[in-house]
Amino acid sequence: MTWRVAALVAVGALTLPLWPAPFVGVVVMAAVVLLLVVVDVTLAAPLRTLTAERAGERTVRFGGTAIVDLHLHNGSHRPLRAVVRDAWVPSAGARPEVPPTRLVRAAPGAVLTLPNHLTPTRRGDRPAVALTVRSFGPLGLAFRQRDGRPATPPWTVRVLPRFDSRRHLPERLSRLRVIDGSQPGRGRGPGAEFDALREYVSGDDVRSIDWRASARRAEVLVRTWRPERDRQLICVLDTGRTSAVRVGDEPRLDASIEAALLLGALATRAGDRVDVLAVDAITRASVGGVERPGQWSRLAHALAPLQPALVETDFRLIAGELLRPYRPRSLVVLLTALEPGALGEGLLPVLPRLAARHRVLVAAAQDPVLASLTSVAPRNPADAYAAAAAWRTLADGDRLTRTLTRHDVTVVDAPATHLAPALADAYLTLRSPSTPPRPWGPRRRT
């Protein structure tokens, strides 16, 4: 029953002094109100004939807005007067166009459309959880409501990563074209992948002479090289406890996903094959064979539901995946945290085998709190102790970086907002033919 029943009883109570017998007035008034309530419920549209469906967007980028329509079909012969509450998880940011307190109407056999605007506040899958419909009678004295009627139509909106770093992609693609020789520029270099044979001319490097081909042709031939293409890049995301640390306004994992997306988009444009692994104690996601720019959306969909797990990352599991016999020599990009405890005990024991098989790059997002603690003069003993702890943490990170560098590992340590472009720059540097470290593609024979 609604508040109108109480109001009707209150109005009837004002007439009790006019009755010869007040007790009889109470009985008559209660009977009349009860009769009106029964009639009102009887005339309300039944819920068993009401069906619900959804239509609209299933994906939205983090920070954007998706519209999902709820369609209610009134299959009864009575008009529908109802209030509808379409509930989603709180992080979906649902804003119904029609508030759940407003009465909506649908004629018999008609379809009522209720749009819902979703502005999610978290990345991942945001499902609809419940649908509640209250069917009122024409007098508004009572309503029908039943759990599970109508059934909640399932619908999930996948919130893709924000990918603000895509603004850096045009500049990096321009540098990539310079490296590949599609446009003139300095630093083209000799390349590392065999291209063709041509006749020797004065000034050519004698180490490029192909003696077997020269013997067959009875003339001196040299090999020409081009920048490596069609190579393998394996991006490993650490989803363990260190990825749950908030770096700025978001977890460190979000900065790692942003960097992985930019690196994947750049590598596919360069013609490299990209595999992505997300691992902590188990493998959370595995995406392989991303070779064309059109497959980038598949990578974004696979990384969108990832969430940090409060467990230690099993680097032996990562090493086992990377050292499988079918994996060719690759550039392994490990997106993690430069934490001496986690990497010192987990990564360093397996690093010699990884570095012998693959080219390894470790990328980490810096914690801005450390920089703020070391840049402000302490005002009290508590600030001094906090600054000392920050300096010690930074010193431990520097020692870890030097240790990784001794194993021929490239380290990228940058703030979260600059990690994606910094990692892309490191990739282009390693891809450049003039880079001193060995390439990660097929070995060049001389």
Image (spheres, rainbow, N blue to C red):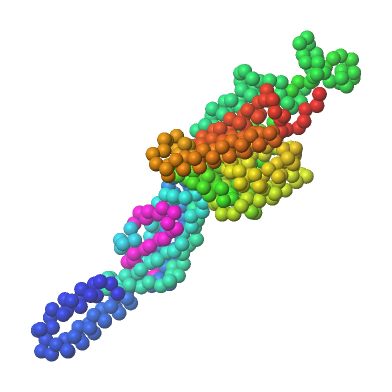
Dividing the picture into quadrants, the one containing residue 72 is: bottom left
Q: Residue 10 placed where, x, y %? A: 18, 76
Is residue 263 found left or right of 70 in the rendered image? right
Q: Residue furthest top?
A: 202
Please provide the residue range marked out in magenta.
75-98
Is residue 155 found left or right of 38 in the rendered image? right
Is residue 135 found left or right of 245 in the rendered image? left
The question of residue 87 being in magenta is answered with yes
The relative height of residue 85 versus residue 62 in the rendered view (above or below) is below
Q: Is residue 304 visible?
A: no
Q: Residue 436 placed where, x, y %? A: 69, 25
Q: Residue at coordinates 61% horizontally, 25% vertically from top-left?
A: 177
**Nearest the camera: 417 or 342?**
342
**Nearest the camera: 230 or 53?**
230
Q: Is residue 148 visible?
A: yes
Q: Residue 232 placed where, x, y %? A: 69, 37
Question: For the C terminus, which image quadrant?
Answer: top right
The question of residue 283 being in magenta is answered with no
Q: Residue furthest front?
A: 381
Is residue 5 found left or right of 116 in the rendered image? left
**Nearest the camera: 4 or 357?**
357
**Nearest the camera: 236 or 171?**
236
Q: Residue 122 placed where, x, y %? A: 47, 50
Question: For the N terminus, which image quadrant?
Answer: bottom left
Dividing the picture into quadrants, the one containing residue 311 is: bottom right
Q: Residue at coordinates 66% horizontally, 47% vertically from top-left?
A: 346
